Amino acid sequence: MAGSKNKKNGIEVDLKNWLSSAQRVAIAGIGNPLRKDDFVGVEIVRNLQNKVSQSVYLIECETVPESFIEPITEFNPTHILIIDAAMLNLKPGSSKLIEPGQMVKHPAVSTHALPLRIFCEYLAKTTGAEIALLVMQPEDTSFGEGLTSKLRETATTLTNLLSKILP
């Protein structure tokens, strides 16, 4: 996984490569609805509703992804994509596809009760699925509702991209 920065075609290539053997994909959108751009993961999952096949399971985890371990496991995915905001030290709206082991370099912004690394490790053991994180650099994670215009644009772009390449 190359981890392309903010080139749209770079993230497209990374996602296509990662999803090339996918048969059943669980997509978990993570984020706090009261922390502006931190909500981008859930926003993308909401935008994907009615745009993907039955082989894609969309989950709005908000700040409690661990609450969805059982439904994810029961779906029996070959791939699990976790979408979240993360401090990447890039321009706002920049996105990367990273492996769970790379999370030390890119800590998530969200206020998760259970660290995402532990969530990913548990899912990897229980499902055997390939796991990746689609992370975006937020512009503003202060208290408030609604994405900034930059993150709304990123969410739309990534929604359109995912709707085209998911199985």
Image (cartoon, grey):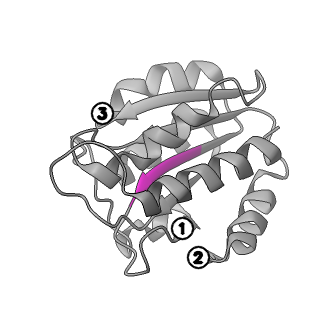
> Distance of mark 2 from mark 1, alpha carbons?
6 Å
> Distance of mark 3 from mark 2, alpha carbons?
28 Å
Mark 2 or mark 1: which comes first in sequence? 2
Residue underneath mark 1: 95
Eyeballing the image, is 142 above or below 79?
A: below
Check residue 65 in the rendering and tell me which mark sits there, or answer none.
none
Quadrant placement of the C terminus: top right
Residue underneath mark 3: 64
Span colored in magenta: 81-85
Which image quadrant for residue 73?
A: top right
Q: Identity of the amino acid at label 2?
A: Asn
Q: Residues within 10 Å of mark 1 (few under 14, many from 20)?
A: many
Q: Secondary structure at mark 3?
A: loop
Check residue 6 in the rendering and tell me which mark sits there, or answer none.
2
Query: Image point 48% across, 67% down: which residue?
Result: 93
Quadrant placement of the N terminus: bottom right
Frontmost of labels 3 and 2 is: 2
Eyeballing the image, is 156 above or below 69?
A: below
- Number of numbered discs visible in the structure rendering: 3
Q: Is residue 54 left or right of residue 95?
A: right
